[in-house]
Each structure stands twice: as C-alpha cells, then as structure tokens.
Image (cartoon, rainbow, N blue to C red):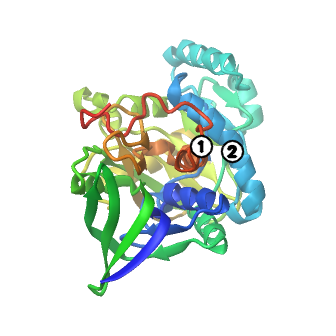
Amino acid sequence: MRRLETDIAIFGAGIMGAGCAYELAKAGKRVHLVDRGLPAGGTSGACDGYVSVSTKTPGPAMTLAIASQKLWRDWAAELGAERVEYQITGGLMLIEAPDEIAKMEAHTALLTGQGIEARVVDRKAMLEIEPELSPQLHGAVDVPNEAGVTPYLATLALLDAARAKGAATSWKTRPVEFDIAGGRIVSATLEDSEGGRFQLAAEHFVFCAGIWSRDLGAMIGLDLPVIPRRGELLVTARGLPLAKRFLVSARYLTAKLDPDLAAKSDDPLIRMGYGFTLEATPHGQHLIGNTRSFVGYDRSVSDDGYRTILAEGAKRVPALAQVSILRAFAGLRPFVPDKKPLLGRSAKYANLLVAAGHEGDGITLSAVTAKSICALALGNTPPVSLKGFEPDRFSGAA
C-alpha cells in the first residue's frame, strides 16, 4: 500500500479545515487536507456569513468571538477583502415585542461591558438607520462593527492560499482505519472514490469534519457528540438592497441558545427554532432566514420552513413581500449538547487536535479556531484560553 508522510493531517475541508490548513502551512508545516466530499460542500457552503459578537452572551464563547472578529480583519487583508467579500456592515438586533426591550437593554449593557460598541435605539432612530424595516417593531440594538463574509468564497480562498504554501489535498477520500500506538495516532488508511487505498502518516491529526466529526471520533473510541441541526435559508433575486446592516431578531438569540424550548413550546415558530435574519449580499441579493431544527441528516427545505421564513420576513421588512425568491437551501450546523465547541488537544491521544461543533458560530469563530489549532500543533500557547472546550469532555477523559 502506498504510504505518504506529512506533518499535519487535517480531516474536513469546510471553513475550519481550510483555516487550519492555511495557518499551519503559513507556519511552514507540511499539511495534507482530506475530505469525504469536496471543499465547502457541507455546512460552510450552506450558511450566512455573519462575523458577529452581538449574538453571543458573555463568557467563553464571546471571548472567542471577540478575538476571532479581530483576526478576521487580518485574514481579509491577507486573502483579499474583495475575494472573500469581507465587509464591516454593522448589525441590528430587532426588538419585536415590548417585553423584549428590557432584555435587550440588559444584553446591550453586557456587550458594552465587554468593550463592544453597542446601543439601544428607539423606533424612530431604527427607521433612520434602516428605512425598510416595519414601523411595528419596537427598536433595535445597533452594533456598528459587526462584519460579514461569503463563507464558501472564504473557504476556497483559504484553501488556495494553503495550497500555494505547499498544502496537499485529497478530495472524495475517507478514512477507513486509524493505526494507534503508545497513545498516539500513527497513521490513517484512506480510501478514495475509486476504491484505491493509501496510508497517511502524520505528526499531528486534526479532526474538524463538522457534522461528520462524531464518526471520526467513533473510529478511535472518542465520543465527539456533534449532532446535525438544520438551518433553512432563502435567497432572493437581485434587486435594490433592503438593508445596510445585518438584521437579526432578538428571538434568534433565544432560538439559538435554548434549543430545548422547541420541544416544550406550543408556538410553531419556537418549535421550528425560528429567528429572523436578513443579510444583503454585495451582489444585490438577500439571504433570509432562519430556522433551527433537529431532523437528522435531512438537508431538504421544508414547506413549513419556506413559508414561515418568507411570511415572517415580510413582517419585519415589508418589501420582502414583493421580491422574487431565487432559491432555497438548508445547511446542517454541527451542534454539541452543552452548546460549546469541541476545541483543543485530546487528553487520550497526544497528537490529536479537534475543532468541531461550533453550530451557528462557525464562520465567526473560524479564525480564532485556526490560530488556536496552529498554536497547539507548534507547541505554543493559543491566543485565547480553551478551558471548557476540551474535546474529550464527553469521553470521561480530562
């Protein structure tokens, strides 16, 4: 059997794997990136591109997001802001009911306490910022430094940059076995789409395969409980932009942070994890969302999801009732039961690094995740503390 050797073997070619490959190749490491499909063929090709801190709550996740938002500016400069369509758009978190005002004021105070520029604006000021919003809304939280990218373009740009620095790639290739000795992964036996097999030996192995990370963990006896959580989005035809900011409802924060509500509520919107989002692209289109539901590996768009996103979107931005919908798609977000990513070095396998389970925060957290994985592989200290994100925490290994 043919045998290849590399410094770092990375499994998964979404935004996480692409970012890790780029940072490690930039650091001079030999990198080999493997994916069971094609680059950006999974979640990173089926999501919006909000690089956000306002949709987090203070704690470890917000610390990661603040660091990552700054690192994204570096990536945009290195890769070319136009190429990845990076822009600082700002964000508005919409207040849809009177009883949300106090909650959003408290959330804004938490944001400003973390050094994030944010303010609550009333209905009049909200409409001055975004005239297309419904006057039935009760105001918004304005966060002017939020940013956005086009995820699949960013993923492909990172891969191109990694390859330019010597990274090797194997697409439509899956691991069938890992060789383990002395508490380390020695090599992986890989099989390509035509049934050909080869061995890949590496100094470090990185698991960042999104919703497929659980399968990788099972092959080596690790519980990496990444569960697919479907998110549905609609894409409009090109037309006049309906928003300058990235728009997101306060309900979005609830749906994201408390998935258990869906099982307990009689409200159909809560049951499907609905929270309004709207992103205007640089090409005059709009991404409208958003649902969150556990339906296994089903990537089809449901009739209820389609109708709800369009109808509820038009309540917030009435002009959406007049736009043409070009297409609809769904992505499977990698959800972890304790709502924290699996990020860091395995306690069971000394040369295994894991970066998975970022759910709807993958685009935002990709930069700090890649920097952290690179630092660990080089024997350096990550840019932020990874305490609480230990990848073995569900396997009984501390």
The N terminus lies in quadrant: bottom left
Q: Are marks 2 and 1 in contact (CB under 8 Å)?
A: yes
Residue visible at 54% across and 30% down? 385
Q: Amino acid at mark 1?
A: Val
Instruction: Place residue 384 in its image quadrant.
Output: top right
Residue 6 lies, in percent from the top left, at 48, 69
Q: Which residue is the site of mark 2?
A: 71
265 lies left or right of 151:
left
* Percent of width and height locating residue 247: 61, 40
Residue at left offset 70%, top offset 26% = 116
29, above or below 378, in the image? below
User: What quarter of the picture does the C terminus occupy?
Assistant: top left
Q: Give the residue pinned by disc 1.
A: 368
* Closer-to-camera residue (102/377): 377
Helix or strand or loop: what does disc 2 sit on?
helix
Which residue is nearer to you in this view: 127 or 175?
A: 175
Residue 244, placed above or below residue 211: above
Indicate left or right for 335 with 275 as reference. left
Residue 8: assigned label: none
